[in-house]
Amino acid sequence: MTFTTTTSDAPTRAVTPPHDPLHDAALELTPEQVRQIELNRLRAKARQREKQASSSSSSSARNSNAKRPLSVVVPASSGSPTAPSKRGDPRGDDRRKLQRDARLGKYFDYDLSKMVNSKGGFLIEDDKEADDDSKVKERERERERAMQNLEPPVYLDAGRNPKCHDCGSMDIDLMYRKVFRCLVCNKCRNEKVEKYSLLTKTECKEDYLLTDSELRDEELLPHMLKANPHKSTFANMMLYCRYQVEEFAWKKWGSPEALDAEWERRTAEKKKKKNKKFEQGLRELRKRTREGVWQKRKDAEHKHDFGETMTNEDGVGVQVCHECGFTIEVEEF
């Protein structure tokens, strides 16, 4: 049994009862076993006292309000970011950085103290200079664009200036010269429409029987791109000079007469295919119509439904149709 004692100013705790020799006699233990039991009991009490002492020393002391203090003691050997810095470490004031969550994606760190406002809509860094090679390449591209947009020079010597092929005027159309590599003045371009007018890609394919690969080749047929007037989202128009397209078509087909013959042959073949398709559809329609009429006639045929055999006044057996009243004579055997 275990007895407890209670006082007014002390909490209740367990007290070991005195040793009862009668209990040992009842169990019939040897002196060696009794001695071993006493040693185990004393060791257990010693371990219990050490455990209580360690728990009381590790727990923080309570204040006057019987509450634990707000400050938490963190050992210096702890790996927590709030752990005190180690003495003698030159980086003692720095805290170990927390690792960034990979789910937030990639990002770039910029030091705003080194940023300079260029007042051009973006920020640049003082210590980051542009690559010299990229600057040189950009200047070369700008120079090439400027050279392309420049008008050709005019020489004092009239023989060195380009002239129109038709009238010899020096008032050359710059667009035709740059895009189509054609020397023509504005007057001749407006008057000779049958030679210098512009053709679309569709007209070149339908009228001159040219292919897409031939029309895309800039070396064979130079063309000009222009925004589609029908809708801004459509592909750009490809415009060609008429006399260049005709020269290429005559060279491809041999002569204008050969081109006309090829165009007539293709038109006739297209018409033949169209008629063949129409006739085939007409035959299928007639077949479906004929089958429908025959089925209707078949369904419209009347089938007599005769009743039981009856005997008339003459003693002859007859059968009458229930629907139309048709009567037939029946001989019974």
Image (cartoon, helix red, strand yellow):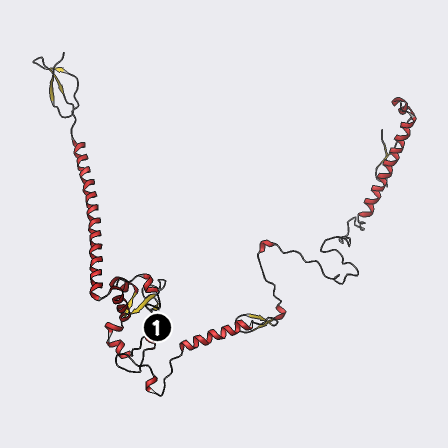
Residue at the image position 60 percent from the left and 54 percent from the top? 102
Residue 19 in view of the camera: no
Q: Residue at x 87, y 36 (%)?
A: 43
Residue 239 location, quadrant = bottom left
Relative horizontal placement of residue 177, taking residue 66 as reference (left or right): left
Q: Amino acid at mark 1?
A: Val
Q: Which residue is mark 1?
A: 179
Please identify the quadrant where the N terminus is shown.
Answer: top right
Q: Is residue 323 left or right of residue 171?
A: left
Would residue 114 be seen by someone viewing this image from the given angle? yes
Residue at the farthest bottom position: 156
Outermost residue toward the top in this view: 333
Quarter of the view holding residue 312: top left
Q: Nearer the viewer, residue 168 or 99?
A: 168
Residue 193 or residue 253, whichever sits in front: 253
Judge whether 133 appears above or below 78 on screen: below
| Residue farthest to the front, as pictured | 254
At label 1, counting other C-alpha atoms closer than 10 Å, the crowd grade (few under 14, some 14-19, many 20 or more) is some
Q: Is residue 2 left or right of residue 310?
A: right
* Residue at 24% over, 77% down: 191
Where does the image place residue 66, in percent across and percent down from the top left? 79, 48
Q: Position of residue 229 (x, y in %)?
A: 32, 66
Q: Nearer the viewer, residue 241 or 162?
A: 162
> Image quadrant for the C terminus?
top left
- Residue 292 horizontal/vertical position (percent): 19, 37
